[in-house]
Structures are given as C-alpha cells and as structure tokens.
Image: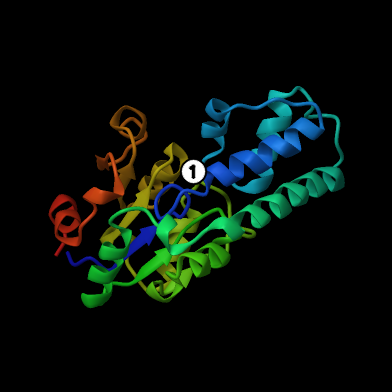
C-alpha cells in the first residue's frame, strides 16, 4: 500500500506548547482555589479544553460548583492567558527534525494535516512559520475528543486519504488510542512504557528520529 497522508498532533509533536497550557491552567485553577502540578498536567495532554477543565474541577472537588456558563467563562479566561503566552513562540521553537520531515513530505507530494484538539493551531503554525506545509487543519469544534478517532478520520477525509494508508504522529496516550481506533499506523513520540501500552506501533524518544524512509519501512507502506 502507498502512504497517502501523514497526520500530526501539534502540542508535543511539532512544538512544546504544553508548558504554556500548564501555566495558563495553573493560574486559572489557583484563582478558584485548586492546586495542580506538572504531573497532573500530563493527564490533560491531548484533551480538549472543556474536558481539561472538568478534570481540574474534579481534581479540586468542585465539579458541582459551577454552571455551564461559568465553566465556559473559566475556560475562556484560561485560553486568553494561553494565547497571550503564545506570543513568545518563534520558528526556533519547532521540535528538531520536524522541518526536515515536512520538507521530505512536500517533495514526495504526501499530504499533511493537523489533527489537534487545539483551537489555536492556525495561530501556532503561523508563529512557527509552518502553516504552508499543511494541506489542512481539522477544526476540533463539535468533534468528539481523543481518544475517539473522529479527528483523525476527519483529517484523512480532508485530503481524500484511506485511513489504512495514513500515519498518525502523537505524544499522548489519548492520541495514540485515537489513531489506532481510526485504523491507522500510530507513531508515538515519548516513552515506550507510556505510549506502547496505548497501542503505538512504534515509539521514538524524540522527533529527531522522524524521517520519511524510516516511517515507510516501519509502517510497511510505499
């Protein structure tokens, strides 16, 4: 089978905006009397905004305290802080190996799509000067979040690709589960003992390891 598309998560795969998410969530949580640490923040990776807020409220035993409108306000406050922090992003914040992989994919006419829970993906790609490399960015609004497969299926659909001929790249457990549920080959970036049990077909410790030929061989695609 021929590789028809490579689908990328954003946070933790192309760049590290997790630190900005953590700062923004931590500040919001502190305002309502909830303490979160970096270990807890790991459980928010790959999870969309409102789901992340719910996890924080449960963590702080405040899940019944706020109306839906109040929860949306808290999530919006967090996002405003996060967007302000993104002003610090530059092309130098792109992870090692990503520019080279995107160039290889472009030269071989292989479509690329962003499949991220982040509603700020266009802004982030603009800051990194990578937007022109992508054929599409899935709008996560109204789509069930990871580990459901919908966002990856939508990404494949955007470029007319057969899911079985797609490679998905993720750094979170929820993301790997979503890729596998979509019937795709799952590449994990991170630790084998975390992403392997989630179903990753192969795990690389760093994006430095990503290269088109290596991915084709691993996924048994042409």
- Give x and y (percent) for residue 44: 56, 37
With 141 as the anchor, is 102 left or right in this view?
Answer: left
| Residue at 37%, 60% in the rendered image | 7
Q: How many labels does the image show?
A: 1
* Residue at disc 1, secondary structure: loop
Query: Can you tell which quarter of the image residue 130 is in?
Result: bottom left
Quarter of the picture containing the N terminus is bottom left
Colouring scheme applied when the structure was drawn: rainbow
With 139 as the anchor, is 202 left or right in this view?
Answer: left
| Residue at 48%, 61% in the rendered image | 90
| Residue at 30%, 49% in the rendered image | 207
Q: Does 40 sit above or below residue 216?
A: above
Q: How would you rate the neighbour count of disc 1 (Cα within 10 Å): few for under 14, some for 14-19, many for 20 or more? A: many
With 57 as the anchor, is 65 left or right in this view?
Answer: right
- Give x and y (percent) for residue 43: 54, 32
- Give x and y (percent) for residue 152: 44, 57
Q: Name the residue under label 1.
A: 147
Query: Can you tell which quarter of the image residue 30 is in?
Result: top right
Quarter of the picture containing the C terminus is bottom left
Viewer-nearest residue: 178 or 202 = 202
Viewer-nearest residue: 2 or 110 = 110
Could you tell me if residue 12 is visible in this image? yes
| Residue at 35%, 35% in the rendered image | 195
Q: Does 134 sit above or below residue 177?
A: below
Viewer-nearest residue: 175 or 161 = 175
Viewer-nearest residue: 20 or 2 = 20
Could you tell me if residue 47 is visible in this image? no
Query: Can you tell which quarter of the image residue 135 is in?
Result: bottom left
- Give x and y (percent) for residue 156: 39, 65
């Amino acid at each position: 089978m021929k590789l028809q598309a490579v689908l990328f998560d954003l946070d933790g795969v192309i760049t590290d905006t997790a630190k900005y998410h953590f700062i923004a969530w931590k500040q919001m949580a502190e305002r309502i009397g909830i303490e979160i640490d970096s270990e807890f923040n790991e459980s928010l990776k790959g999870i969309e905004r409102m789901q992340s807020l719910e996890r924080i409220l449960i963590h702080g035993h405040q899940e019944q305290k706020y109306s839906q409108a109040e929860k949306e306000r808290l999530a919006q406050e967090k996002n405003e802080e996060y967007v302000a922090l993104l002003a610090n992003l530059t092309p130098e914040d792109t992870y090692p190996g990503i520019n080279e992989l995107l160039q290889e994919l472009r030269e071989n006419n292989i479509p690329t799509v962003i499949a991220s829970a982040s509603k700020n993906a266009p802004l982030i790609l603009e800051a990194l000067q990578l937007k022109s490399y992508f054929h599409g960015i899935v709008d996560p609004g109204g789509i069930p979040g990871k580990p459901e497969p919908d966002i990856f299926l939508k990404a494949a659909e955007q470029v007319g690709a057969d899911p079985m001929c797609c490679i998905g790249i993720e750094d979170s457990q929820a993301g790997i589960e979503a890729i596998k549920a979509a019937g795709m080959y799952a590449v994990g970036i991170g630790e084998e003992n975390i992403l392997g049990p989630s179903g990753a077909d192969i795990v690389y410790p760093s994006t430095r390891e990503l290269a088109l030929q290596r991915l084709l061989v691993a996924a048994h695609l042409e």
